[in-house]
Amino acid sequence: MQTADAIKVLSALAQESRLGIFRLLIEQGPEGLPVGVIGERLGLPSATLSFHLKELLHAGLVTSRQSGRFIYYAPVIAAVNGLVGYLTENCCAGSGDSCAPVAKRTTAARPRVKHHVVKTLG
């Protein structure tokens, strides 16, 4: 990855809605999600969602495909791997040591929060 490409990717992710969209798509995996589902899950209006998806497409972070009446968006895993590689390619070079790879975070390590509705008498 070149510096200009890294800047484009980082710029696309440096916005709350786009980062949320991308993280949702990464969770979903290569099959992606239809636009309507993305909007529902993140509470984004269609016009706003369309704008952010266009920015992610332009940065090469997502792909789109038509399936029947639906347009699906999916993450480009290679783009993220390329960015991580670019950011860490010279890791510890100045010290002469080699850097150990970052351990994968498992879903078990991330606690899930459940929200409960409490009814009050009144």
Image (cartoon, rainbow, N blue to C red):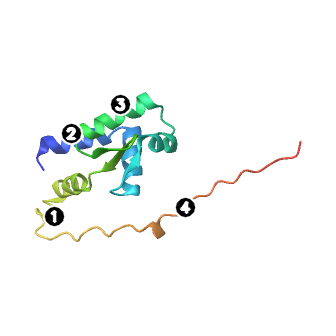
- Give the numbered dot on residue 8: 2
Which kind of residue does numbered mark 3 sit on? Phe
Which residue is denoted by mark 4 in the rendering? 112
Q: Secondary structure at mark 3?
A: helix
Which kind of residue does numbered mark 1 sit on? Cys
Q: In the rendered structure, which disc, 2 or 1, sits on the residue that comes first in sequence?
A: 2
- CA–CA distance between discs 2 and 1? 25 Å
Q: Position of residue 29 (x, y in %)?
A: 36, 58
Q: Position of residue 103 (x, y in %)?
A: 32, 70
Kindly identify the residue that appears in the image at 22 percent across and 44 percent down. Answer: 60
Which residue is denoted by mark 1 in the rendering? 92
Rendering quarter of residue 51: top left
Q: In the rendered structure, which disc, 2 or 3, sits on the residue that comes first in sequence?
A: 2
Q: Are marks 3 and 1 in contact (CB under 8 Å)?
A: no
Q: In the rendered structure, which disc, 3 or 4, sits on the residue that comes first in sequence?
A: 3
- CA–CA distance between discs 3 and 1? 39 Å
Q: Nearer the viewer, mark 4 or mark 1?
A: 4
- Give the numbered dot on residue 51: 3
Q: Position of residue 52 (x, y in %)?
A: 35, 35
Kindly identify the residue that appears in the image at 13 percent across and 66 percent down. Answer: 95
